Amino acid sequence: MEDLEPSYRILSSTDPAEQLFESLHSPFIDETTDTEVLIDIIYRLALEHFLVRIRYSGVTHGDIPLLRDVVTRVLALERGLRVPFIEGLADLSLHVAGNKWGREQQRFLAGIRWIVQGRKDRRLPGVLVDGGYRPPVRKDFDQLPRALTMALKCSNCGKKDGTIICAGCQVYTIYDGQKYFSVSEPYCSRKCQGEHWAEHSGICKSRTRLRRSVAVMRAFFTAAEFQASNLIPTMCSVRNHVTIVKEESKLLVAMQGDYFVRTFDADKFPTKRAEMMAISNEFARDIFSQIHPLKVWLWSTDWCKRVEELTILVKNVDCPIMRMTPDGTTESTMLRPHPVFRVTLDTGERFAVDIAGGRFGWKEGVVRWDHYEKRRVLHVLSSVESNYADADYSNLPQVNTLPVAVSRFHGMLIEGLLEKMKEPGAESVSPDAIKDALSTRDHKSWDELMGRILDFVKTTCREVDLYHFMSSPGRGWMYVNAKGELRVTLHPAERAKLDDVWLTSEEAKILDAADTEGLKLLWTERLKRHGIEFRDPEPTTAEMLQGITVFANPNPQTEVEAEAQEESAQEESAQDSI
C-alpha cells in the first residue's frame, strides 16, 4: 500500500461532494504547470459541475449546503480560484463534528482534510471500494514509515536480522522529550559490527556531527522565538486533526503602540506539541537568514561539503496549523512554502535538515534526502547554494516592515547569544567546546553538554537586554502608517511623536477588531487631527539605519494648532491693513 499513487476514488458514487473531490484529486495542480489560466479553467469547470449536480442528485446530507456556499463564493472570483477554494475547505473543516456523523459524512470530512492537507502517499482512508468499506492504511504522518528509515539488513554481511544498531550514528530528533529515529546502521552481531568499523567510522562521525549540530540549532531557534515572538494568540485548539490558532488583531495592537515582540504565550496552547508546532511555524518564515551565524559556526566545511537552501511545497502533513484572525482571515500552513536544507556530507551521503518541520506535526529533523524527497516533498519551488559570507542586514527590504523587523531581531539575538557564550564564566558552553564535542563518542558527556546548552540559551534569553543587539536604546514598537500598513519603529523619539495618537486600552476594548477598514479609517482620522504625515515613499533600509525618520513633518501641528496659527495670521494681516 505504501507505493500507491495519491488518489481519491469512490467507485460508483452519486454524492456530488465526493465527485467534486475526485475531480480535484490533485489540489496542487500548479506543480506541473505555470499557466494560472489553465488552473482556473480546471477548477471553474469542476466547481460549476458540482452546483449542477446538487440540483438533480438526491443527496441532501447537511454538509452539502456548507460546501455549496464555499463553491459559490469562490466562483464569484475572476481568477485565482485554487487557493481560495482550499482555504474555504480548511475553514469548513473546522465547523464539522466528524465523530457524530454517519459514514457519508465521515467520508466527506476525510475528503476535505485530504484536499486541504495536500496529497497523501496512500488512498483516502475510509472509502467504499468494490462494495466494501476499507479502513485507513495509516492513521497519522508525524513520522516516516519505520520500514523506510529503520533498515533490517546487516550492513556487513547482508543478513536480514540486523537487530544491533550502531549507537554512535543513529540519527534522531528529540521532540517533546522523546527520540524519533530516522537513520540507523544495523548489524546482526557485534562481530560484524567490529569487522565493518574501518569502513563505517567516517560515516558514523559525520552523521553524529550533523545530528548534534541540528539539535543545537533547534535549541537556539526555539529559545529566540519563545523570548521574542510576534505571535499574539488568544486561544488554541485541535479539531479534526487541525491545530487552530486564533490571534489577536495586530492592527489594533499596533494602534496602541505596543511592542512588536513579546514572550511567547505558552499558556494559550493546550499541549506541548501544539506549542512547539506554533513556535516552529513562526521561525520557519525566514530561517534561511536567521541560521547564518549557526551555520558558519557548526557546519564546518571539512565534513559538511555542501549546503543547499530549498523552498518546497509539502505533502503528507500530519496536523496542519490554521491561523485565524478577528477579521475572518484564515491561513493554512499547507499552502505556504516551507524551508529545508539539503546537506551533503564528506562521505557523499545527502540529508534533509528540516529544523521547522514541527509546524506540520513532523517529529524528525534529520532524514535521508531520498526518503524525505519521496515522502514529504510535493514540489521544489527553488534551490540555491548556501554561502558562508557575513550577513548584511542593510540589504533587507524595508527594515521597518513587521516580518523583516522580526527576522532581523531574531538574527541579531542569535548572534548576541553566541557572543555571550564567549564571555568569561561560560567556558563549559563556549562555541569552541561545543564544536569540538560534536564528534565525541562519549554520548553521556554530550547529553550533559546538550543539557547545559539548553539551560544557557533559555536563561540568557530571559536575562539579556534583548534590544541591546539592535544598536538602539529602545525595544521596538508597532505602529500603523497613513496607508493602514503595519510598521515597526526602533526609535523612542519616533514613537513619542505618536503619543497623542495612540489608542488607550479602554478605547481599544470598545472597537470591533474584525472591522479592519473601520480601524484604518479611524487611525487615518486621528493622524490628520494631530497633523501627522509620513514620508511617501518611505525611507530605504539604509536610510533608516542611518537615523532618517519616517515622518514627513518632524514637527507636526495638530488641527487646533493649525487653526489657531491661521487665526493669528489673519489678525496680524487685519492689523497691518489698519
Image: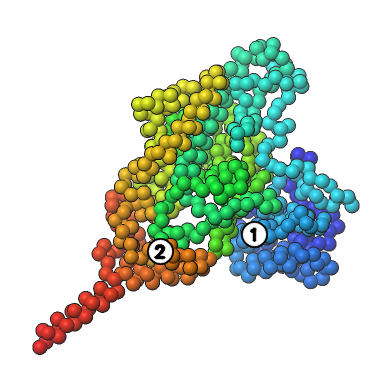
- Residue wearing tag 1: 91
Where residue 348 appears, as percent x and y from the top left, is 57, 26
Residue 552: quarter of image: bottom left
Q: Residue 168 placed where, x, y %?
A: 60, 21
Residue on which disc 2 sits: 504
Q: In what quadrant of the picture does the C terminus appear?
A: bottom left
Amino acid on which the number 1 mark rests in the picture: Asp
Please identify the residue farthest to the right as the structure is shown.
131
Query: Is 259 situated above or below 382?
Result: below
Of circles 1 and 2, the one toward us is 2
Q: Nearer the viewer, residue 323 or 197?
A: 323
Position of residue 563 relative to residue 483, above or below, is: below
Helix, strand or loop at label 1? It is: helix
The foreground one among 557 and 393 is: 557
Q: Can residue 309 be seen in this view?
A: yes
Which of the pair 547/513 is nearer the observer?
A: 513
* Quadrant that contains the N terminus: top right
